[in-house]
Image (tube, rainbow, N blue to C red):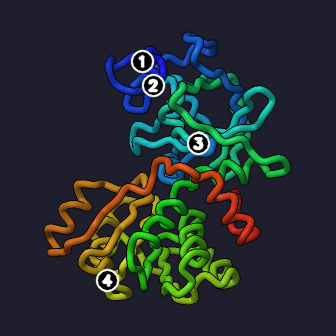
Amino acid sequence: MSRYGFHRVIEPKGVVPQAAWKVDNTPRQLHESEKLIEVKLLNLDSTSTRQIKESGAKITDRVQEIVAQRGKMHNPVTNSGGVLLAEYNGQAIVPWASLSAIPLHLESIGEVHGQQIDVVGTGVLFESYFFTAVPDGMDWRLAATALDIASLPVQIRRALVERSIKRALIIGCGNAGIAAMATIKKYSPQVEIIGVDVHDGNFERIKAFGLSNNLGCVDAANAEELFNFVSDCDLVVNCVNVPNTEASSVLATKDHGLILFFSMATQFDQASLATDATGKDVVMQVASGIAKGEDDEIFALMRDFPDLLALTH
């Protein structure tokens, strides 16, 4: 059972490390199957970053507090973490597993660059944890940014193959939303792409890439406002980092359409109940997590659309 890391779980016993409240982050191998990695960078997920900032806490202090308490960077409020970048056998790598699943010991914590934090520490990977070697010459920070959202393009490509999609709505126009649009443009250029965000900061970039001109400053937490802007979409991709956007996603989707929730702020009880309250028969999928081939997909997308992703500061 060492393959899944049960031996590192302190409490509650019997769960996998991601689901544990606390794990053993001893900075040495406790089993021969473990990989001990030198952690250089934490790339927090946007939902966790937003929550920590809104709480008034200093990000570095809060990260140190969480890791000391839980043995991993697992935000107890958002139940999320992000990804890390490390060195293993002299190679820069990014594990596919969430920070919320990786035993982490921090020796020191440095500067904050947007969602990214420079650190010196040790992490533990189990046999079941995939990782990607950062291509030679690729900026480490950009690689971490890309691999944090890498599963989304694969899942969108699958949806485009499996379904007849003519109209797609992207809720949230950050890096994940832009990658979603680029994937649709690459594989199904005939699809009408609509984008909404509470801020218009990336709208000019989206237009410059030729991804969409149909963009609106809309608060997705306001279901009526979003519904008045757009409806009857075959595909809705929710990439926001704030709660209470589930009903908006449902209302914007046509019957039998597909919603991909790529948001750690998603409350699936709210999503399910929103279908009851609106009478909408829609398919809902979790787009977070891993998807085989996600690293190749995101790197190919970055080659097809140079400067697609932006580092946050």
The outermost residue toward the right is 137
Q: Is residue 261 left or right of residue 306?
A: left
Closer to the camera, 1 or 259?
1
Rounded to the nearest angstrom, the CA distance separating label 4 from label 2 is: 43 Å
Q: x, y (%) of residue 19? A: 37, 31
* Disc on the earlier residue, 3 or 2: 2
Name the element at disc 1: loop
Locate residue 256 relative to residue 212 in the image: left or right: left
Question: Callout 2 environment at 10 Å: few (<14), some (14 to 19), or many (20+)?
Answer: some
Q: Do residues under tags 2 and 1 come within 8 Å of each other at their CB atoms?
A: yes
The count of marks equals 4
Residue at screen point 57% across, 83% down: 189
**Dot 2: what SS?**
helix
Query: Which residue is pictured at 56% across the width and 41% down the height?
Result: 96
* Residue 91 numbered mark, or none: none
Quadrant containing the N terminus is top left
Residue that mark 2 sits on: 4
Instruction: Return the mark for residue 83.
Output: 3
Tag 1 residue: 1
Residue 253 image position (x, y, % from top left): 31, 77
Tag 1: amino acid: Met
Residue that carries the numbered disc 4 in the rendered image:
227
